[in-house]
Image (spheres, helix red, strand yellow):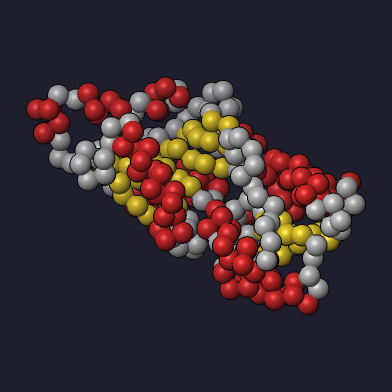
Amino acid sequence: MKRREFITLLGGAAAWPLAARAQQPSLPAVGFLDVRSPEAMGGRLRGFRQGLGETGYVEGDNATIIYRWAENKIDRVPELTVDLVRRQVAVMLVTGNTAAVFAAKAATAAIPILFITGEDPVRLGLVTSLARPGGNLTGINFFNTELVAKQLALLHELVPRASRVAVFVNPANVTATESTERDAPPAARAIGLQIQFFRASTSREIDAGFATLAREPPDALFVGNDGFFNSRRVQFVQQGGAPSAACDLFRPRIF
């Protein structure tokens, strides 16, 4: 798919003659799939709707948004993507976890899919290249897992006396966890840091991790790239008592 074609996919509907638009059985539908919950996405949903409005689309007026939330249960994602395909949405936006992107790709080769990832989409096999994604997928890469070493180095600069760092990863986000667990240890050794991994896929498991840390507090906290973790940032800050290493430090790459 060419980038311009994808961006203008819904825009073409705005140019339909009024008579032709009246003959449509329903409004153009956008499928919105996220692994988190609507409560955790309040601010970003407002931004999403604002962005649609700036391109001439108002939910319930001239566009329909079909939301599907996995509520942090990754095993529900395949059935949710199949449901959106069954409803014949014009385009699908997939966020929160790379597993959801793979599920959407497996569910349809016809519906355009816009996704957001912190990993290299070419290495994962989601697209052919950044310049020419090919197929029906395109999106934004935020570099997050590619820059684990740089993020650890930045953390070391911010807290130069730190020697022990606790690293949280979400095992439900397999690709991000594998990248962090692969790249963090050698990067930490290179700058003299000791790291300890904590795996958490639920709020309760995050609490359990901090309960362990309370017995032997680390010098700093590094939170791995993950949509669920982003939605629990307040919990991390409250539990940790200090800012963690942020993932939103670098400009995204749009392809």
Residue, x 34% and y 48% (percent of image)? 84
On the picture, is 171 further left or further right than 184? left
On the picture, is 201 further left or further right than 62? right
On the picture, is 209 further left or further right than 66? right
Kindly tell me whether residue 228 is visible in this rendering: no
- Where residue 74 appears, as percent x and y from the top left, is 51, 59
Residue, x 40% and y 58% (percent of image)? 38
Q: Which of the 4 quarters of the picture holds residue 253?
A: top right
**Foreground pick, 129 / 205:** 205
**Foreground pick, 62 / 6:** 62
Which quadrant of the rendered structure holds the N terminus?
top left
Q: Is residue 22 above or below residue 151?
A: above
On the picture, is 173 further left or further right than 214? left
Q: Is residue 96 above or below residue 11?
A: below
- Where residue 117 appears, as percent x and y from the top left, is 56, 42
**Foreground pick, 24 / 60:** 60
Q: Is residue 6 above or below residue 209?
A: above
- Where residue 72 appears, as percent x and y from the top left, is 50, 62
- Where residue 40 appears, as percent x and y from the top left, is 46, 59
Q: Which of the 4 quarters of the picture holds residue 161?
A: bottom right
Residue, x 59% and y 27% (percent of image)? 129
Residue, x 56% and y 69% (percent of image)? 203
Kindly tell me whether residue 40 is visible in this rendering: yes
